[in-house]
Structure formats: C-alpha cells, structure tokens
Amino acid sequence: MISPTDLRDVIPTGLLSFPVTPFTDENEFNAAAFSSHLEWLSSYDIAGLIVAGGTGEFFSLAPGEVVEIVKTTKDVQPHDPVIAGCGYGTKIAVDLAQAVEAAGGDGLLLLPHYLIGAPQDGIEDHIRTVCQSTNLGVIVYNRGQSVVTAETLARLCDDCPNLIGFKDGTGDIDTVRRITIQNGERLAYVGGMPTHELFAQAFRGAGVDTYSSAVFNFVPKTALRFHAAFVAGDDAACEQLLREFFYPFAEIRDRKTGYAVSAIKAGVKLRGFDTGRVRSPLTDLTGEEVEMMQALIARFE
C-alpha cells in the first residue's frame, strides 16, 4: 500500500484512469472482461486508477462488488495506485473503507453521502469519521448534496493527516479557488466534472492541475494527447481536440440523462470489449447513438 503522502504526491504527475465496470448477461460483475480491458489500458502511462467511481457505476454496486473490483485491479495493475469509490451513509462508508484497505487498495474517493441534504458540520463529521477509520489516503469529492467549504476542508486537513485530496464536480470555481489557495500543497487537486477535458483549462486557472478521464476508457491515445497539451499549456492543441472530439462526444452524451456513463461504456464496447449493459436506473445508447459513437471513434483511435 502506498502511503497517503506518497499518493498525494503521485496524483498530479499524470492522468487518472476512470474505468467502467462490466457486467455479465446475469448483471453480475464480470471480472474477466474487466481484466481484459485493464490489460489493454495498462500499456499507457497514468498516475493511478479510480475504480468503482462514477464512471464505474459506484451508485449501482454492492459494497462487496467494490471490494472484488479492487482485488481484480490489483491483480492486473499491481504497480499503479488503486483508488476506490466509497460512500453512502457513514456506517456503510466506514465498513467499505476498511474492506478496501484489507483488499489492498491504496486510496479512497469519498463520494457524496446518500439521498438527504446535510448541514456543513454534519458533512464535516461524516468525512472525519471515514478518514479516521482507515489508513488509506482519502480524496473528498465535492458534488451533489455533499459540498464542503474551504473552511471546513481546512479543519479536516488539520484533523486528518490521511485526507490528501480534493476533487470537484460542482464547477463552482470560486469555491475551488478558495480551497486551493487556503490548502496549497497540503492537498492534491483533481478535476471531476463529467468529461472534465471540457473544463480542464478553466480549472487549471483555479489551481487544479490534473483530472480523471472517462474517455481514456476507449480512446486512450486521444485522452493522453489532450492531457499532454494541457500540462504543456498548449491551449491551441487543447482547443483543436475540444472542437474535433470532445464537443462532438458531448453532443452524444447530452442526449439523455445518465449518458455520461452510458456513452463511455458504449465506446468501450465499440473497441471490442465485453461491457454488458449499464445497470438501472441508467439506460444504454440507442442504435443510432451507437453509430454516432462509432463514427467519432473511427477518427480518433
């Protein structure tokens, strides 16, 4: 297991992979298909993997499946840090955090708690309790009903040495900038907007120097080309890829709620991997939309 401090330091060094979770025809986790896809991606340099995250359908997984995904990932890519999704209520999150640690995971992406809104001190207590239940490095994901302020996060950093990262999925640049200024190098900062490449340049100005890429699942070369241009500050190259690939992809993704996951899974399937269907309540792309994805991928293999 990589130490929380080392995990914090390695996160900004490259792109973060955000793999999908394939299912069998019986709607069970397909470990063989998952391994095959990871092996294909393993030839590309990344800073780490976030498995069973948003793109990996964490919201549809049983806790035991998350643990199985972590074990499978460590078998296939033992040298890359493996960060696992974690969340729901505090008791479930604590149990899952400890199970991921026992399974050999290297870190946790703490997704929003389930269903209900909560006051800032309640969210703070939830995060603190999860952090103090494990030795793993924890990344807080600001999204949905679980959004911390800069002041809350600063207190948590003081109390929790293993709180090592902040990921934003709100798009609230003001809050993001306050957090990056107040916490500086104490945390690693990760962009977490859906298809974050669309937002990466704006977030860079707020101090967020890396992100997780969902499209890396099916066009890894294109994802790494964009990331290299992003790191180099080559805005012209970024904008060309935005025009030619990312915005056309977003047009497909935006056709129906939930397609931010479904379109990625369709892309993986078009690259020849068995993904199964997305789990309900998500729905798969239509035949017409799959053809649109196929035409786009054909230009960016």
Image: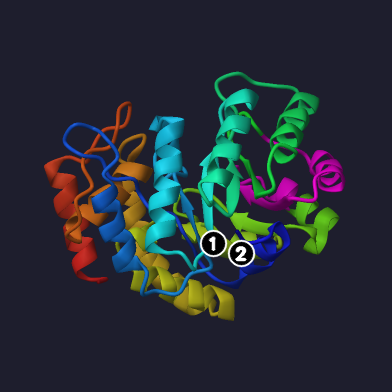
The magenta segment is 147-176
Depth check, front residue: 278 or 227: 278
Look at the numbered disc 2 and give the secondary structure of its residue: helix
Q: Position of residue 87 (x, y in %)?
A: 57, 33
Depth check, front residue: 120 or 50: 50
Nearest-to-viewer mark from 1 and 2: 1
Task: Classify residue 28 as left or right of residue 105.
Answer: left
Q: Position of residue 156 (x, y in %)?
A: 81, 42
Colour scheme shown: rainbow
Q: Which residue is mark 1?
A: 81
Q: Name which quarter of the figure residue 100 lies in.
A: top right
Between the C-alphas of marks 1 and 2, the distance is 9 Å
Look at the numbered disc 1 and give the secondary structure of its residue: loop
Give amino acid for label 2.
Ile
- Tell me whether the residue at label 1 lies in contact with that at label 2, contact meaning CB atoms closer than 8 angstroms: yes
**Quadrant (top left/top right/bottom left/bottom right) for the C terminus:** bottom left
Residue 11: numbered disc: 2
Task: Classify residue 226 as left or right of residue 204.
Answer: left
The structure residue drawn at horizontal position 53% and vertical position 68%, both measured from the top left corner, is: 47
Badge 1: residue crowd in 10 Å (few <14, some 14–19, many ≥20): many
